[in-house]
Image (cartoon, rainbow, N blue to C red):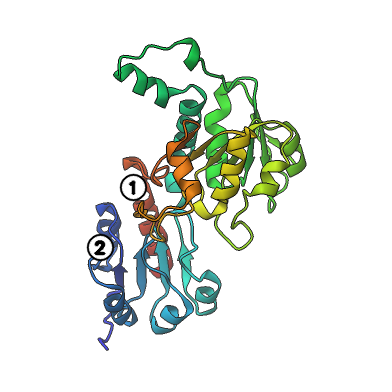
Amino acid sequence: MEKINNMKKILCIDSNHDVLHETLIDAGFQCDLFWNKSKEELIQLLPNYHGAVIRSKFKFTKEVLDLAINLKCIGRVGAGMENIDVDYAKSKGITCVSAPEGNRDAVGEHALGMLLMLMNHLKRSDHEVRNSIWKRAENRGHEIAGRTIGIIGYGNMGSAFAKKLKGFDCEILVYDKYKTGIVGEHIKESSLYEIYEKADVVSIHLPLTQETNNYIDDNFISQFKKNIYIINTARGKCLNTTDLVKHLKTGKVIGACLDVLEYESVSFENIDTTTLPEPMQYLLKSEHVILTPHIAGWTHESNYKMSKIIADKMIAILK
């Protein structure tokens, strides 16, 4: 095993904006950009490092953490931490940090854009016009104004989406199981029951945990008094696709905006379209669904901000 010298070393497992390693190097760290190495090679290298930077392709399990004997900090360039055993890392004196502050605006804007696209038939009407079809009455849309938007999960992402909705003259109900005393001039802290009773649109902003796996399911959707639009920019497995399709077919779900999918790869980098089950095939063909490839938090601006935030947080921990 290579002996660590006085210069603290950071292993960059995934590629990120150059500002990340440039900031770390300027602060006196050695950064090794090894995102083309295999998982096996990276595990062999880990004992030599004080810090590691990841996105989604690499998992820090208990077994991997046990091998990282000098590790003091893991930086996740993104919001979710489901690919790190955070509790076990903490027990070994390893601090784990993420950067939800860096892509919250991107997620809020993307969720709003998808909703506007769906409610105003922008995808369909654009396609029709490009094919010399001119339909006006058939593409008459709906306004957000006067509607009630339910936001479940009021962290960085949920609060950013609420902020983007501020100028739309709608009622915004927010619910977070782990927060109370939520205040804001344009929002109302709510119970889940009140969202079931009043919401026209529900947007999920939850981390993926055992508790939130399949959070949007048949029982969840059936609780709503009105027919609803659903937005998911959180994690694909927070939503049960089979149950969503069931309610799209009945009209209980008017439409869905899905930036994340139950069937995407663990790394979020691809989806195998040759083996997709029937519910996903239905989504692909439905005019009532807007799909994007896990890019809500993936703007040029958020790429820079998340990388810079992670670098600054790791410097504060490792200096």
Quarter of the rendering containing residue 65: bottom left
Could you tell me if residue 94 is visible in this image? Answer: yes
Instruction: Quickly name the residue at label 1.
Output: 303
69 sits to left or right of 23: right
Given the image, on which type of amino acid does mark 2 rest?
Answer: Ile
Q: Using the image as rendered, state which of residue 163 and residue 253 is in the foreground.
A: 253
Q: Which mark is residue 37?
A: none
Residue drawn where x is 42% and y is 42% of the image: 296
Q: CA distance from mark 1 to mark 2?
A: 19 Å
Instruction: Quickly name the residue at label 2.
Output: 25
Residue 134 image point, x, y percent: 37, 11
Dot placed on the residue nearer the N-terminal end, 1 or 2? 2
CB under 8 Å between callouts 1 and 2?
no
Against 122, is 94 above or below? below
The C terminus lies in which quarter of the figure? bottom left
Residue 59 image point, x, y percent: 41, 69
Could you tell me if residue 239 is visible in this image? Answer: no
Residue drawn where x is 51% and y is 48% of the image: 234
Residue drawn where x is 43% and y is 72% of the image: 60
232 sits to left or right of 291: right
Q: Using the image as rendered, state which of residue 305 and residue 263 is in the foreground.
A: 263
Residue 72 image point, x, y percent: 42, 74
